[in-house]
């Protein structure tokens, strides 16, 4: 019974968390990071707060990884952050 509840609650919690996150975070980004074997389980993988709100988002809400992603986005001239960049995160190694 607990497994079924976990299978329903966990994805829903992730979706709400990511939906409320900054303008660059998406459910697909979190999913792609997890598929790459990275320990991305919730918003705090890139954010400081557990439930960042899009309306009150500031760059200070990002942790070092999130700030690095935004800097990489700027250097790449990309429209969106790419999950594959996380493999290049210096502290990951």
Image (cartoon, helix red, strand yellow):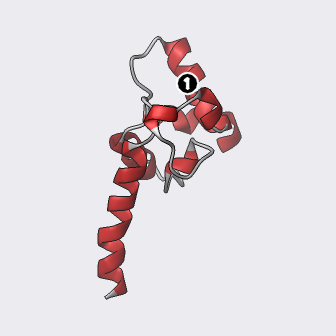
**Count of marks overlaid on the render:** 1
Foreground pick, 48 / 35: 48
User: To which quarter of the image does residue 21 belong?
Assistant: top left
Q: Residues within 10 Å of mark 1 (few under 14, many from 20)?
A: some
Residue 15 x %, y %? 34, 52
Note whether 41 is above or below 68 in the view shown.
Answer: below
Residue at image point 54% right, 37% down: 86
Residue 28 x %, y %? 33, 42
Residue at image point 39% right, 60% down: 13
Residue 89 appears anywhere in the view: no
Residue 7 x %, y %? 32, 71
Residue at image point 36% right, 75% down: 6
Which quarter of the rendering shows the C terminus?
top right
| Residue lying at the far front of the rendered structure | 56
Pointer 1: what residue? 70
| Residue lying at the far bottom of the rendered structure | 1
Left or right: residue 32 compared with residue 89:
left
Note whether 63 is above or below 74 in the view shown.
Answer: below
């Amino acid at each position: 019974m607990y497994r079924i509840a976990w299978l329903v609650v966990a994805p829903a919690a992730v979706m709400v968390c990511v939906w409320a996150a900054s303008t660059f975070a998406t459910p697909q980004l979190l999913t792609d990071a997890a598929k790459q074997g990275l320990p991305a389980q919730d918003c705090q993988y890139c954010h400081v707060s557990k439930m960042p709100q899009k309306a009150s988002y500031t760059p200070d809400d990002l942790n070092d990884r999130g700030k690095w992603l935004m800097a990489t986005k700027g250097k790449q001239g990309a429209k969106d952050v790419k999950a594959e960049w996380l493999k290049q995160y210096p502290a990951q190694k």
